[in-house]
Image (cartoon, rainbow, N blue to C red):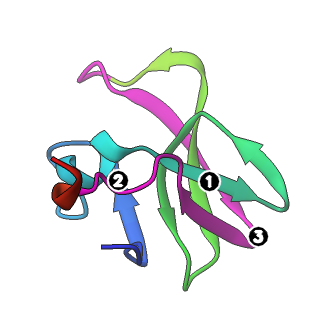
Amino acid sequence: MTDLPDRLSNDPSSPFYNAELLERGVGIRFKGVEKTNVEEYCVSEGWVRVAAGTAKDRFGKPMTVKLQGPVEPYLRAPEPDAEAE
């Protein structure tokens, strides 16, 4: 599972949420800069949603801003080797 999905979200209520993949650690480079506050991304459409400060919506979720530009997702940790055990 080395290829990452086109779209991924860290919100469990989203249809693009993948807990297994998020546990391994997904990093995002947006316009060549490492971003650590990305809530959701889409590679094909070229956007990321980042938290807008500490503001929360009425459901307690962070307010987000959609930024346009090139998105490069990558895995931070290598895939665990099942054969090594």
Circle 1 — which element? strand
Mark 2 vs 1, N-terminal side = 2
Q: Is residue 4 above or below residue 74?
A: below
Residue 73 lies in the magenta-colored region: yes
Q: What mark, if any, has residue 69 been given in the picture?
A: 3
Circle 3 — which element? loop
Q: Quadrant of residue 50?
A: top right
Measure the C-alpha gap from mark 2 to mark 1. Answer: 12 Å
Mark 3 vs 1, N-terminal side = 1
Residue 39: percent from the left, percent from the top?
Answer: 46, 43
Q: Is residue 22 above or below residue 2?
A: above
Q: In this figure, which residue is indicated by the disc labeled 1?
A: 28
Mark 3 vs 2, N-terminal side = 2
Q: In this figure, which residue is indicated by the disc labeled 2?
A: 9
Q: Amino acid at mark 2?
A: Ser
Q: Amino acid at mark 3?
A: Gly
Start-end of magenta stretch:
58-81
Residue 76 lies in the magenta-colored region: yes
Residue at (17, 43) in percent of width and height: 12
Q: Quadrant of residue 65?
A: top right
Q: Nearer the viewer, residue 60 or 3?
A: 3
Q: Quadrant of the N terminus?
A: bottom left
